[in-house]
Image (tube, rainbow, N blue to C red):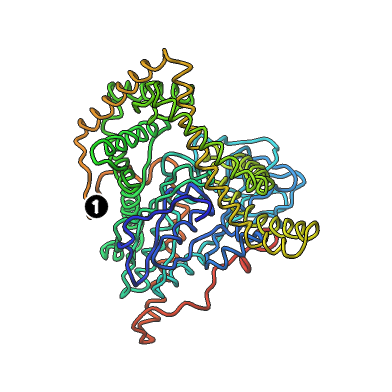
Amino acid sequence: DLFFKDIPSRNTFKVPAKGPVLFVCAPHGNQLLDPLVVMRTCPRQAGFLCAAKTMRKRVVGTIATALDSIPVERAQDLKAPGKGLVAIDGETARGEGTAFTSEVRERDRVCVGGVEHVVEEVRSDTELRLRPARDPSAPASVGPSPYEIVPHVDSARLYEAVMERLGASECVGIFPEGGSHDRTELLPLKMGVALMALGAAARFPGVPIRIVPVGLHYFFGHRFRGSVLVDYGEPLEVPADLVRAYERGGAEMQEACQSLLRLVHQGIAAVTITAPDYKAMELFWMLRRLQTQVALQRAGKRPTLEEQVALTKAFSEGYDRLSRSPATARLIDKVSAYNRQLRLLGLRDYQVDRAYFHLGKRSLLRAGVLGARMLFNSLAALPGLLLGLPLLLATRYISKREQAKALKSSSVKIAARDVLATYKVLTSLLMTPLLHAVYTTAVWWYLDQRAATAYFFFSPFVCWGAVRCSESSRAAFREAWGYASYALLPSGRGELTRMREEVKQGVLQLVEDMGWMPPSSGSRSSLHPEGPGRDVLPQGAEPPEQWIGLCEALRAESLRKRGGLHKGGLGGPPPRGGLVADASGGPDKKGR
C-alpha cells in the first residue's frame, strides 16, 4: 500500500466463497510483487507457486514460506557447466576430460553451442548416447566445445502437492506464463495449469474444481507510487467431458489438456490487455486519454480506473481485425509522431487541450500559484527526502544491478523492468528499520533520550508527509513546464494542436469503424473452446514430449488414489498433510 499509490480491484464478487479455486494470473509483469498484489485484493487465502531458487534465498524464502507458497524446481535454475569438453557426432557425445558417470544422468540435457541434447544413456565417463534431435536445423556434429548440464527435474511432487490442496478445498495461485517478463503481449501458456486442474478433477470426482482468471494492469508499476488494478474474471469449472477424456488417456488425454488450456487462455484474454508491439500500445494509451477528456467534458468527472481498463481491453480485442488496414497504419504513425513531439517539449497530452495555455493575466496568476505550490511542497519535503536519501540511492543501485543480471540471463525480457519494483521493495524492507535505528541512536547520542523518543515515533510521519509533498510538487512542476514550453515556443503551439486534433479524429473514427460498445459492468464473459482469440499453442509452446509422460503418470496416480478413496469409504477429499512439495529432499548438492 505504500509502494503503490492505488490498488483497486474489480469483480471480486466472482471469486467462489468456498470450494477449491485455481487462480491463473497474467501478465506476470512484476516478479515477486505480483502474488502479493493478488493476495492484497483476493477475498480468499491462496498459496502461490514460487520458484524453488527464490525460496532458497534467506529473506525472500522466509517471506514466501510464511505466505504458504509452493516451491517449483525449474531445470534452468539448476544449469551448471560440465567438466572438460564434449563433441557431438549424431546421437553420440564424446568427452575429453569429462566425468559423465558422476555429473550426468539419463534424461538430463547437455547444452552445446546453444542446442540442448537429451541424454538417453550414460555409457562411460567419456561417452553418452543421445536421443534424436527434435530440431532438424540443429547441426549433426559439433567439435570439442564447453558444455552445460541441465538436470532433469521430476515435477510429480509439485503436481501432487497442488492437487492435494485443491482436494482439500483450498486455493492455489499460478502464473501460467512461467517466469516474469516485461513484454506487451502474453507469453505462451504452460501446460502445467491444465494438468493440475484435470488431475485434481479426476482424483476428486465429487469436488468441483474452479479456475478463476486474474488480470494485473500496472500503470508505471516499476516506479514508486505507481498504480495497479486487479481484475477477476468469470470462474470456469473444469468441464466433465474433458475430465472423462483425460481419464481415458492417450490422444484423448492430450486433446483434453490442450482444450482446457484454450479455455484458460480465453479467460485470461478477457481480463488482460495485450499488444503486438509498442506502437500499438501507444495507440491504446491514446484512446484512454481521449476517453478521460471526453468524460470530463460530458460528465464533469474522470472515468474510474476500471472503466479505463474495460475500454482499452475492448479496443485491443478488436485491434487484430483492423491492424493491417492502411488507415490504421497511418494512424499509428501519427500517434507515434505526436508522442515524440510531446516528449521533445516535455508536455503531457492533457496540457495541449487546455484553454488556459493562451497566455494572459489568468495564465500569469496560475503560474504564480504553481510556483508558490512548488516552493512550499519542496521545502516541506526536504527533511524527509534528506533522511531517505541513503535508501533512495541504495534501492536505485541494487534494482539496476539486478535488472542487468536478469536481462543477461533471460531470453524473453525486453528491458527486465519486471524485477525493478521487487528489489526496490526488498531493499526498503531491509534498510528502512536499519536506517531508523541508526538515526534514532544518533539523535540520542547528540541530544538526549527525550528527543530520541520523539524522533522514533514522529519521523515516519515526516517521511510520509515528504512523499505526499513531493508528489504534489512534481504535479505542479509538470503543469508549470507546460506554460514555459508554450511561452518559449509560441510557433509550435498551433502545430501541436493540429497534430492532436488529427490524432483525435483518427482514433475516434477507428473506434466507430470497430463498432465497439462499452460492456455493462455486470456482463459475464462466456468461454468456449472454439471461441475467438489467438491460439495458445503457437510457436514457442512446450513440445508434447515434455509433458505427455508426466501427464500419463499423474493420470494413473490420480485414478489409483481415487480408487483408494472409494475403497476406504471416504466421501470427500482428504485433508492436506503428509505431502509437502519443497526444495529440500528434492535435488541434492549438485541439483539432482
Q: Quadrant of residue 409?
A: top right
Instruction: Give the quadrant of the C terminus.
Output: bottom right
Instruction: Assign a secondary structure to mark 1.
Output: loop
Task: Say which residue label 1 marks.
Answer: 521
Residue at 31% across / 44% down in the picture?
303
| Residue 290 position within the rendered picture, expressed as x and y whole percent measured from the top left | 31, 33
Q: Quadrant of residue 173?
A: bottom left
User: Can the viewer see residue 119?
Assistant: no
Task: Note whether 557 is above or below 279 in the view shown.
Answer: below
| Residue 471 position within the rendered picture, expressed as x and y whole percent measured from the top left | 51, 43
Q: Nearer the viewer, residue 304 or 481?
A: 481
Asked whether, in this view, residue 175 is left or right of residue 286, the answer is right
Task: Note whether 550 is above or below 503 in the view shown.
Answer: below
Type of amino acid under label 1: Ser
Q: Nearer the viewer, residue 19 or 501?
A: 501
Residue at 39% across / 27% down in the picture?
362
Residue at 60% across / 49% down in the picture?
424
Q: Nearer the viewer, residue 96 or 517?
A: 517
| Residue 426 position within the rendered picture, expressed as x and y whole percent measured from the top left | 61, 54
Q: Nearer the viewer, residue 516 or 503?
A: 503
User: Can the viewer see residue 248?
Assistant: yes
Q: Quadrant of residue 23?
A: bottom left
| Residue 522 position within the rendered picture, expressed as x and y whole percent measured from the top left | 23, 55
